[in-house]
Amino acid sequence: MDTDYWIAADKEHCWHPFTRQSEWADSEPLVLVDGEGVWLTDSEGRKYIDGNASIWTNIHGHKHPVINEAIKAQLDKVAHTSYLGFSNPRASELAEKLCGYFAKDTLNRVFFSDDGSTAVECAVKMAIQYRFQTGAPERTEFIAFDQAYHGDTMGAASLGGVGAFFDRFKKFGFPVTHLSGLGELITLNKDQIAKTAAVIIEPLVQGVNQIRPWPEGMLAEIRRWCDEHQVHLILDEVMTGFGRTGTMFACQREQVVPDFLCLAKGLTGGYLPLAATMVQSQVYDAFLGDADRAFYYGHSYTANQLGCAAALANLSIFDQEQTLLKLPEKVELLKGLLADLADRHPMIYEVRQCGMVVGVELRGANGKAFDVSPRVGEKICLLARDHGLLTRAILDTIVLLPPLSITADEIRQMCEALGSTLTDWTKKNLPSH
Ligand SMILES: *Cc1c(COP(=O)(O)O)cnc(C)c1O
């Protein structure tokens, strides 16, 4: 087995997410075979910094001994057992641990599922069923935001605001109104509010919208508005959860507690697919009583024991390694280095940063956005591989979202890699005389 074989089998049989497969067939994919800390190694032995934390999942680095050991120990007991009609030790411990991050009597109930989309899907179905069971069956619509991303299953995708992803499925989705921001929310008319079950938002920063932070204080304002109008607040912290923005959860920055909190990506430290939808007891209580009030929803791998063991280990590392305490210094270092880069490279139009979540938007030297078709961002990320950096662009915004365990030295290497990539690009694309 070698690189040529793996690539040939991939091109013959595999279908990749969000991928134009006909272009993939002509590309030279990297085959990633090993990882340690923030480093990934391909099948030819080349090493790269994992600049987007393996699509925003990894927290404490690859091959972390604590998570590896926890998974192995669990594996020696049992890998998976049904959560339908049965309990399991790791899920109990994990649910208690997650609730412990929030004030007592707030988010104190956890529904497990598999990934970010399903965490959102659960919240949305719960939010609707809640209304049927509390005498407000007319409240079945949702408010979401332009350019939002909440996942790809039908329910979650209908909340999304990226036309290219969902327009062709629109008529099959939930009734959702997309707003540009707080201003449009607070001026919604009464009729619309009366039909609304919940508002959903990615707190502090929209990831897929080219890493775009929300104005400070907006989240707390939305919480106040929701309370005033008996509308539930669903926070999608699938990307922002687990320290990415500096606090354990982004909502803590504005002392906001949502009615539903959706967690996934970083929950297991980037090891295994596992998600959680946390709810307040006021929501949960509406599902008690008569049998037909039950939440008829579940997946075969709900509360997978290996996943829960990985998540517990992931959370324990935050305590052992004081991950959050070490972050401010890293965030500041990254900010300074990126400001230097922006000074040196006229291509950098804007750097948007929220904790360890960064978008570096590139534009032409005249400040005008590049045409879409040459896909400059994508090509720059391909070129970055030659400089030892793996990441993806969203349009022409280069995402830097490394594992939180990245060291000061590695932050410097990551920024240097981006800098030399831009220099390289500029040389290659200088107009010839
Ligand atoms: C990634 C993401 C999702 C979807 O999660 P999956 O695990 O890919 O299904 C939902 N919301 C946000 C904010 C995300 O970043």
Image (cartoon, helix red, strand yellow):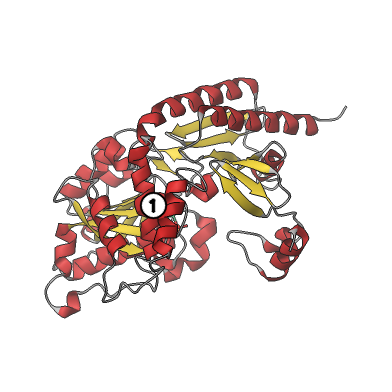
Which residue is at the far right?
433
Left or right of residue 155: residue 384: right
Give the camera-side residue of 291 and 99: 99
The residue at 14%/70% (across/down) is: 288
Quarter of the image with the C terminus in it: top right
The residue at 27%/36% (across/down) is: 254
Task: Tell me, yes or no, if residue 157 can be seen here.
Answer: yes
Which residue is at the far bottom?
291
* Percent position of residue 207, x then y: 46, 45
Mark 1: secondary structure: helix
Task: Tell me, yes or no, if residue 114 can be seen here.
Answer: no
How packed is label 1: few (under 14 Cα within 10 Å), some, or many (20 or more)? Answer: many
Quarter of the image with the N terminus in it: bottom right
* Percent position of residue 367, x then y: 62, 29
Left or right of residue 14: residue 198: left
* Percent position of residue 412, x then y: 57, 27
Mark 1 and ligand 1: say if the CB distance to the nearest ligand atom is below 8 Å: no
Pointer 1: what residue?
A: 267
Q: Is residue 255 above or below residue 71?
A: above
Which quadrant of the picture is home to ligand 1? bottom left
Q: How many marks?
A: 1
* Percent position of residue 340, x then y: 57, 20
The residue at 20%/66% (across/down) is: 131
The amino acid type, in three-letter code, at marker 1 is Leu
Give the camera-side residue of 142 and 92: 92
